[in-house]
Image (cartoon, helix red, strand yellow):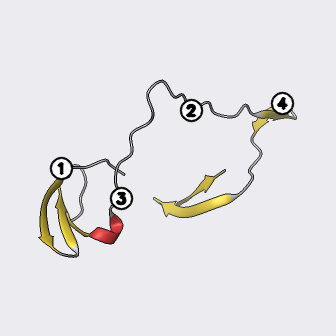
Amino acid sequence: MGPYKVKGIVSSSAIELELPKSIKIHSVVNVSRVQLYKPQVERQKKIPPKPVIIKGEEEFKVEKILNKRIVRGKKKFLVR
């Protein structure tokens, strides 16, 4: 999610973020949940891998599952 601007420092372990009204969470979060935003390098393109066609359908080869989560009842995977 993000990037979001830091509105202020609440304590040594919590900060307040500038969040859009569409996000229905508390704006004060623990600093362990925040990462420094690193913008994409200029002129760098992320070229997605080409799919493999198997029996007329596109498929991708997954090297490794990095993370998984459930969003609105559906499993989502972060893969390499």
Q: Amino acid at mark 1?
A: Lys
One can see residue 45 in this view: yes
Q: Are marks 3 and 2 in contact (CB under 8 Å)?
A: no
Side (left or right) of 25 relative to 46: left
- Residue shown at the point (32%, 62%) measured from the top left: 34
Q: Which numbered circle lies on residue 35?
A: 3
Q: Which numbered circle lies on residue 56?
A: 4
Residue assigned mark 1: 21
One can see residue 73 in this view: no
**Sequence-earlier tag: 3 or 4:** 3
Image quadrant of residue 26?
bottom left
Q: Position of residue 50 (x, y in %)?
A: 73, 31
**Sequence-earlier tag: 4 or 1:** 1
Separation of disc 3 and disc 2 at Cα?
21 Å
Q: Secondary structure at mark 4?
A: loop
Q: Amino acid at mark 4?
A: Gly
Q: Amino acid at mark 3?
A: Gln
Give the mark toward the camera: 4 or 1: 1
- Residue shown at the point (58%, 62%) measured from the top left: 67
Q: Residue furthest right?
A: 55
Separation of disc 2 and disc 1 at Cα?
30 Å
Separation of disc 4 and disc 1 at Cα?
44 Å
Separation of disc 1 and disc 3 at Cα?
21 Å
**Sequence-earlier tag: 4 or 2:** 2
Residue assigned mark 2: 46
Q: Position of residue 20 (x, y in %)?
A: 20, 48
